[in-house]
Amino acid sequence: MRKADISRKTRETDITVSLVIDGNGESNINTGIGFFDHMLDQLAKHGLFDLGVKAVGDLNVDAHHTVEDVGIVIGQALKDALGDKKSIKRYGTAIIPMDEALAMVSVDLGGRPFLGFDVSFNSDKIGDMDTQLFEEFFRALVFNAGITAHIKILDGKNDHHKIEAVFKAFSKALDEATKYDERINGVMSTKGVI
């Protein structure tokens, strides 16, 4: 079973993440940031990952440290759970609608971190979360997991719909990229390593 349990404690946050890649979409999320919890539930459900996140952060300052550090720890857990990456598809792409919003996410688990984030918002907040923190979350996750990710909103007006479509598309693309394919002998690279 591909799984990992990672903890990280700083003077700003105390975070524990448990991740099972080959799960059932179960989640137990508590970051203290309601809308962020809702998005992490989407990540687990639509990627069929089992995800537990417990985060205590300095929310009296703002949500930045908590959101970024949760991204760091989820990224570390994903990297650890993937192990040697033998026989995984490596690439995944998903285009997901949510009402008027349409999101596209494409990922490569090849070990070279990069984030393209082409998402604009009409509001400063969704629920109790600053919209600018979504890019920080994804940057922290992909850089710690070693993922190249391109995230785009192709259409949309409602900020809630747009970012929820992004999380669902990210989860579906990640699910595809982490799947095994018995035709792949070793890793999916002509170099022999990823």
Image (cartoon, helix red, strand yellow):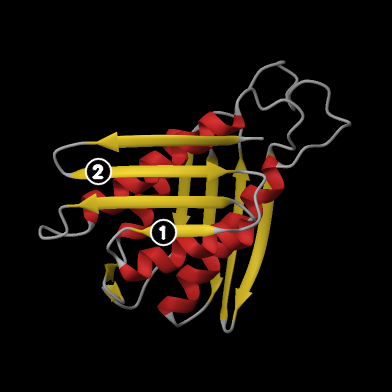
**Location of mark 2 (residue):** 14
Q: Is residue 62 left or right of residue 70?
A: left
Q: Quadrant of residue 2?
A: top right
> Can you say whether 86 is above or below 139 in the image?
above
Label 2: few (<14), some (14–19) or many (≥20) C-alpha neighbours in 10 Å = some
| Front in this rendered view, residue 101 or 86 | 86
Check if mark 2's residue and mark 1's residue have beta carbons within 8 Å.
no
The outermost residue toward the right is 183
Q: Where is residue 120 drawn, in percent x and y? A: 39, 68
- Give the amino acid at mark 1: Ile
Residue 33 visible in the snapshot: yes
Task: Pick the quarter of the image with the N terminus.
Answer: top right
SS class, disc 1: strand
SS class, disc 2: strand
- Give the amino acid at mark 2: Asp
The outermost residue toward the left is 61
Q: Which mark is residue 29?
A: 1
